[in-house]
Amino acid sequence: MTIEIQPLSPDLILSYLDFFDNRAFSDDSPCGPCYCTSPSMDAASEAQMVSEFGDDIKGTLRNYAINLLIAGRIRGYLAFENDIPVGWCNSGDRDGYLAWIPEIAREVSLGKTISVLCFAIAPGYRGQGLSLALLERIIEDAKDKGYSAVEGYPRVQKDREPYDFNGPLRLYEKAGFMETARQADIVVMSKDLREYPTAFDQ
């Protein structure tokens, strides 16, 4: 399997929509329908979107996603096999997110940070290391852009969760992340990218 990972750009909007239209939840996953709009919205905008669901939840989500994509407000990476989108990770500068960042993460900081919020992998590609490949590309790009850290926010699960969109704790451990904070069942996992790490910035 040859996978190519690309940061989301205006040229990939149709691929993004194709992934969520046709592949991401084609196995009737309970996480669908979804177009990964919520991390890019404030509470009032999300409430407005929900009020418009009616009988066409997927269509409403898609329309909001198109507007957010055109505005450049959805950020992340798409994974392709033979030009077909098969995976997605919502990831970007932590300060650019209006929601989904645990408050404790902002209190205990390593500096300028990239957040990893959500993974979606197409059926048939799950369990093959695609999430790890996406995470490694995010780390590589964050280093190149001068970020101090990459963070993820997995949940502590008593039982294995087959649709863990935050990414499981073990994924971050495998990529060399360390726990830096915990809030209820959410663990802040951080990878320090600084050449000479110092104590946490307060």
Image (cartoon, rainbow, N blue to C red):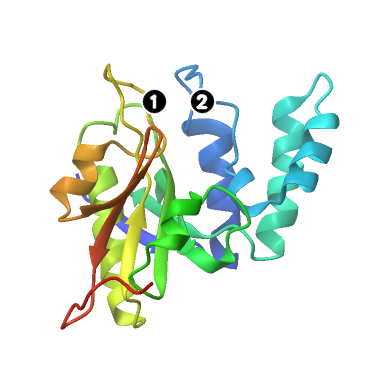
Placement of 88 over or under 192, stated as above or below: above
Query: Viewer-proximal residue, 160 or 10?
Result: 160
Viewport quadrant of the C terminus: bottom left
Give the side of residue 67 with respect to residue 25, left or right: right
* Crowdedness near tag 2: few (<14), some (14–19) or many (≥20) residues, C-alpha within 10 Å: few
Image coordinates for residue 23, horizontal then vertical, percent: 47, 32
> Which residue is under mark 1?
163
Residue 114 left/right relative to 62: left
Query: How many C-alpha atoms fall within 10 Å of the one at disc 1: few (<14), some, or many (≥20)?
Result: some
Residue at the disc numbered 2: 31
Which picture quadrant has residue 72?
bottom right
Amino acid type shown at disc 1 = Tyr
Q: Nearer the viewer, residue 60 or 91?
A: 91
Check if mark 2's residue and mark 1's residue have beta carbons within 8 Å. yes
Residue ID at (60%, 40%): 35
Q: Residue at x 50, y 62 (%)?
A: 8
Is residue 169 among the parts visible in the rendering? yes
Instruction: Find the distance from the CA under tag 2 to the CA under tag 1.
Output: 7 Å
Label for residue 70? none
Q: Circle 1 sits in a helix, a strand or a loop, which is it?
A: loop
Most foreground residue, 193 or 33: 193
Left or right: where 49 falls relative to 133: right
Mark 2 vs mark 1: which is more N-terminal? 2
Residue 30 drawn at (x, y percent): 51, 18
Q: What secondary structure is found at the residue carrying circle 2?
A: loop
Q: Amino acid at mark 2?
A: Cys
Q: Position of residue 160 (x, y in %)?
A: 27, 19
Query: Residue 56's x, y, as percent?
Result: 78, 24
Q: Residue at x 31, y 24 (%)?
A: 157
The residue located at (63%, 57%) in the rendering is 98
